[in-house]
Amino acid sequence: MENSLSISIKLPVSIQRAWQSIQEWESQSDWMLATQVWVTSDIREGVGTEIEAFTGLFPKAKKIGILDLMRVTKWNPPYSCEVIHTGKVIKGSGLFRLEKVSEEETLFYWSEIVIAPRALFYLIAPGLYIGVRISLMRLARALAYPDRSGE
């Protein structure tokens, strides 16, 4: 059964800067809560790029958590990227879309379609929503205060 989740946030940077920050896959590890991200394909951008994201305890060591395998299926810089989740546990699709608000502000939409039994989705959805929300707020803060990113 398909279940959806979506979140949006304003980022305090231009659409080009927002795109650059989001599509630098490994740097997502800096702002995604308890997550480490790797590019596993020979290509690093565009359709066909393959990414792994491990979320859980000790994410760099891939211990106690969930491994999310993704492949980029649509690529439209600096506006949108779609992925398909191809792992054993996480199935579905994801989308991020950027919309220019002004020269220095961008609206970031994040959405996921998770294929899972409805009861299981309702069980995990609150934690998923909170985790993504915190992650996006961390991204916005890192973009607003880039000199403080090491804190």
Image (cartoon, helix red, strand yellow):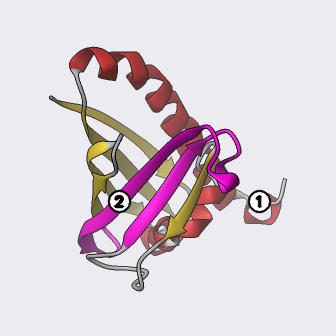
Q: Residues within 10 Å of mark 2 (few under 14, many from 20)?
A: many
Residue 71 included in the magenta stretch of the image: yes
Q: Is residue 127 left or right of residue 118?
A: right
Q: Establish if 43 lies above or below 123.
A: below
What is the count of numbered marks? 2
Q: Foreground: 27 or 42? A: 42
Picture quarter with the N terminus: top left
Magenta-drawn segment:
50-79
Q: Report, in whole angstroms, how far the alpha carbon at label 1 lies from the one at label 2.
A: 26 Å
**Residue at x 37% of width, y 70% of height:** 50
Residue that sits furthest to the right in the current view: 151
- Are the residues at dot 1 and dot 2 in contact (C-beta closer than 8 Å)? no
Disc 2 is placed on an element classified as strand
Q: Foreground: 65 or 30? A: 65
Quarter occupied by residue 49: bottom left
Rendered location of residue 143, percent (x, y): 63, 60
Rendered location of residue 97, percent (x, y): 31, 57
**Residue at x 81% of width, y 59% of height:** 148
Does residue 3 show up?
yes
Q: Which mark is residue 70?
A: 2
Q: Circle 1 sits on which residue?
A: 149
Q: Is most of the magenta stretch helix, strand or loop?
A: strand
Residue 1 included in the magenta stretch of the image: no
Q: Residues within 10 Å of mark 1 (few under 14, many from 20)?
A: some
Three-letter amino acid code at the position of disc 2: Met
Does residue 99 show up?
no
**Residue at x 41% of width, y 23% of height:** 124
Q: Foreground: 71 or 14? A: 71
Disc 1 is placed on an element classified as loop
